[in-house]
Image (cartoon, rainbow, N blue to C red):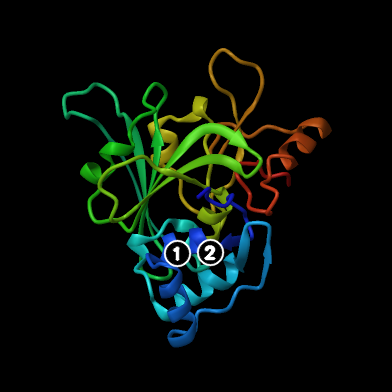
């Protein structure tokens, strides 16, 4: 049987069964005994549920622990997450340069989130995350690509010990953190830039070596005035959901 497609606002029976680790009969039992909402409608792929409604039910009932869920199913933050700082990590202690920088967050629900920023040339770091930072509830690796949903984000569950990460939306990270999430382009993935960042810090243009075009960062040694065109481009660096990625201060 062919699986139903992935949607951003609805989930069909086959995928919901997989998420909740039940079969169709078990799903019906959850609706009768545990208050799982009924499907809102059906289409050519069968009955479907609202993703927001299912997420709310999981949160209200605690049916699945957070470490067993991808972040897209986590609850919305009711306050900004606590930032515990960042650390550079290496494959071996003797390696001359870090392979990645790990940011550590604690969400309003008490979950530990590790956000991994691979350094240029180190794209396959996901399998090292549990070794570098054990016991997190979620591990996110930020890619260098960009799609309609924002930057590439590859997520691993806290209880995941093998396999590849699954892509989630950038908006889910900001939603769970309860605040705008910082973003560094691949050319700005400098350990010092990332480890010295703090929540609420100003975003301003930062020039990388060998280029005259400003790159947007969360830190700049020398602020500069912005032309009207640059201001317009800076405003365009906002995610469609309204979460600011790395647009500079326009004041």
Reply above or below: 93 against 65. above
Let me know if residue 150 appears in the view. Answer: yes
Q: Position of residue 242 (x, y in %)?
A: 68, 54
Q: Report whether 4 appears left or right of 93.
A: right
Let me know if residue 78 appears in the view. Answer: no
Q: Residue furthest front?
A: 1
* Disc 1 packing (10 Å; few <14; some 14–19; many ≥20): some
Q: Position of residue 80 (x, y in %)?
A: 50, 65
Q: Quadrant of residue 45?
A: bottom right
* Disc 2 packing (10 Å; few <14; some 14–19; many ≥20): many
What residue is rendered at 55% in x and 34% in y?
220
What residue is rendered at 56% in x and 79% in y?
37
Kindly check if marks 1 and 2 are in contact, taking CB atoms under 8 A apart as contact: yes
Which of these two is toward me, 170 or 5?
5
Q: Residue furthest bottom?
A: 33
Q: Position of residue 77 (x, y in %)?
A: 51, 68
What residue is rendered at 70% in x and 49% in y?
240
Q: What's the distance in space between the residues labelled 1 and 2, CA to CA? A: 6 Å
Residue 17, numbered label? 1
Residue indicated by mark 2: 13
Element class at badge 2? helix
Element class at badge 1? helix
Q: Report whether 13 appears left or right of 126.
A: right
What residue is rendered at 41% in x and 67% in y?
23
Which of these two is toward me, 108 or 128?
128
């Amino acid at each position: 049987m062919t699986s139903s497609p992935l949607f951003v606002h609805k989930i069909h029976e086959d995928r919901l069964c997989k998420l909740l680790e039940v079969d169709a009969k078990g799903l019906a039992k959850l609706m009768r005994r545990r208050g799982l909402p009924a499907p809102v409608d059906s289409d050519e792929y069968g009955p479907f549920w609202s993703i927001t409604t299912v997420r709310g039910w999981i949160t209200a009932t605690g049916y699945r622990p957070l470490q067993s869920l991808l972040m897209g199913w986590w609850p919305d933050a009711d306050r900004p997450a606590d930032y515990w700082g960042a650390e550079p990590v290496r494959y071996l202690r003797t390696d001359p340069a870090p392979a990645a920088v790990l940011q550590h967050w604690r969400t309003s629900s008490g979950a530990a989130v590790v956000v991994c920023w691979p350094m240029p040339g180190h794209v396959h770091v996901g399998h090292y995350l549990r070794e570098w930072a054990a016991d997190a509830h979620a591990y996110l690796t930020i890619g260098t690509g960009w799609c309609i949903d924002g930057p590439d984000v590859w997520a691993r569950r806290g209880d995941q010990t093998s396999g590849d990460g699954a892509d989630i939306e950038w908006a889910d990270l900001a939603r769970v953190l309860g605040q705008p999430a910082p973003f560094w382009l691949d050319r700005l993935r400098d350990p010092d830039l990332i480890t010295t960042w703090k929540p609420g810090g100003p975003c301003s243009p930062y020039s990388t070596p060998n280029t005259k075009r400003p790159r947007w960062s969360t830190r700049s040694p020398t602020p500069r005035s912005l032309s009207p065109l640059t201001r317009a481009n800076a405003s365009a660096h906002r995610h469609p959901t309204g979460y600011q990625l790395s647009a500079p201060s326009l004041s």
